Image (tube, rainbow, N blue to C red):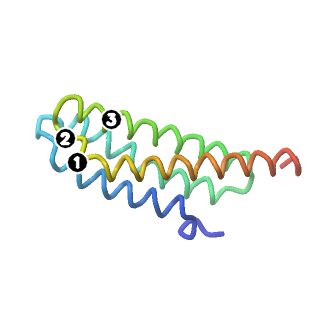
Amino acid sequence: MHYKDLKSWQKAMDLTAEVYRLTKKLPKDELYGLTNQLRRAAVSIPSNIAEGNARFSTKEYLRFLSIARGSVAEVETQLLICVRLEYLTQKDVEAALSLQNEVERMLNSTITKLRDKESVTGQ
């Protein structure tokens, strides 16, 4: 299956677009702080899903999915920091957090399935 057909990649792309939309609201003095960090973490998610999917082994794919999952947690944390610092409201981040949660569940499911496959086939 091509990475563009993966629901997790598609939702991660939606999350990335939402993060870019939200970061436009952040103060200009956060351009090299939270804005940059949030965008890099968001971009990392679909990028690692795609790169892992293009690898030739399940072990490598799992490694990239694990990195993507870490970036999902990073995005969530940084959005919560934006709310805590009152740069964004809870309402502002609701859609992004919902997408983040959905991507996280999808990645967890894929990782579990691939680990099960790996233990059966020894790939």
Q: Quadrant of the N terminus?
A: bottom right
User: Which type of secondary structure does the marked residue at label 2 adopt?
Assistant: loop
Drawn side of residue 8 relative to residue 76, left or right: right
- The percent coordinates of residue 65 (x first, y second) are 59, 47
- The percent coordinates of residue 78 (x first, y second) are 33, 35
Given the image, on which type of amino acid does mark 1 rest?
Answer: Asp
Please tell me in which quadrant of the rendered image residue 35 appears: top left
Identity of the residue drawn at 19% across and 41% down? 88
| Label 2 CA crowd tier, 10 Å (few <14, some 14–19, many 20+) | some
| Circles 1, 2 touching at the beta carbon (< 8 Å) | yes
Q: Nearer the viewer, residue 20 or 97?
A: 97
What residue is disc 2 on? 88
Please tell me in which quadrant of the rendered image residue 27 appears: top left
Q: Nearer the viewer, residue 11 or 53?
A: 11
| Circles 3, 2 touching at the beta carbon (< 8 Å) | no
- The percent coordinates of residue 110 (x first, y second) are 65, 52
User: Which type of secondary structure does the marked residue at label 1 adopt?
Assistant: helix
Question: Mark on residue 78?
Answer: 3
Question: Mark on residue 60?
Answer: none
Identity of the residue drawn at 73% across and 51% down? 113
Question: Mark on residue 92?
Answer: 1
Q: CA distance from mark 1 to mark 2?
A: 6 Å
Identity of the residue drawn at 57% across and 65% down? 6
Query: Which residue sits furthest left?
Result: 28
Given the image, on which type of amino acid does mark 3 rest?
Answer: Gln
- The percent coordinates of residue 75 (x first, y second) are 38, 40
